[in-house]
Amino acid sequence: MTLSGRQKLTIIPLLLYWPAIFIATHIPKVPLWVIRAHMSDKTLHYIAYLVLVFLLWFAISPYKKVRWRRAAVWWVLFVVAWYGVVDEWLQGYVGRNPDVVDFLANLTGAITSLIVLSIFPFWPASLVLTGIVIFVLTTFMQANMADRLPVTNAAFHLCAYGFFSLLWTRCLHHLLPTKAPQPKWLAAALAVPTSFLLAVELSSAVAGNGFRLWCVIISAAGIAAVVITIFLIAFFRQNSTQKLSSGNT
């Protein structure tokens, strides 16, 4: 069976991601590390299954949104739910305590992902789910992480907002009549990620995490790096095409 490009784009990360979260949930010291970092393990469970279901769905149904009347949706939910049960049960054999609340967090993440996938196609769904991950991690897990893990925190902000911007430019390709390197495209490409960044940081401040200007600056750098790179690539391609056209005439 020949795999589509989108299936390759999701199957490869899935084959890496699923074993990784299995290993992470069976390392005895992980809960202690989470507590020391002042993070919520329930939030981590939610995010883990949110991403897992996204990858699993598009690995088996790369070009279709979730339709709740289709059996495939319920099979995905069934498989992920039972995996969550087995995962919690096996943790009892490595010195960790199975937790029903962890399973509920897993299930909530899975259902959230399916709801998003029932509304949006692949690229917008990728953007929305990335936004959810950024919002949840920033709002509910960043209280002391910036001080305790400054390098990790900086890398998270830089990469997360850079990836969000990359997905947004991919969606923008289908939304705007103008394309890069036109100025209107540049303004739109910067506006949405920047607005999202400010909204998330404001929510984080309201949640009691404080407003950290340096996190905003690093996030803005990630946004600018991706958008400007795409803009410059399109600019040079346009110039090269124009030169070839003028040379041929």
Image: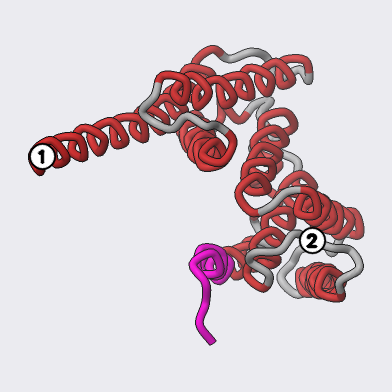
Q: Residue at x 79, y 69 (%)?
A: 80
Q: Please give left or right for residue 79 compared with residue 182 in the image.
A: right
| Res 78 seen here | yes
Q: Horizontal and vertical percent for residue 88?
A: 81, 67
38 versus 43 height, above or below: above
Q: Residue at x 64, y 54 (%)?
A: 122
The colour scheme is secondary structure
Indicate the position of residue 30 as horizontal and vertical percent values: 65, 54
The quarter of the picture where residue 197 lies is: top right
Within the magenta stretch, is there residue 14? Answer: yes
Magenta residues (range): 1-16
Q: Is residue 125 magenta?
A: no
Q: Nearer the viewer, residue 199 or 19?
A: 199
Quarter of the image where the N terminus is located: bottom right
Neighbor class of circle 2 (other Cα within 10 Å; few <14, some 14-19, many 20+) is many
Residue designated by label 1: 249
Residue 156 in sight in this render = no
- Up-down: is 181 above or below 73? above
Name the residue tied to disc 2. 66
Residue occupying image coordinates x 80% and y 56%: 114
In the rendered image of this protein, does residue 228 appear above or below residue 29?
A: above
The residue lying at 63 percent from left, 66 percent from top is: 62
Amino acid type shown at disc 1:
Thr
Which residue is more in the foreground, 92 or 183? 183
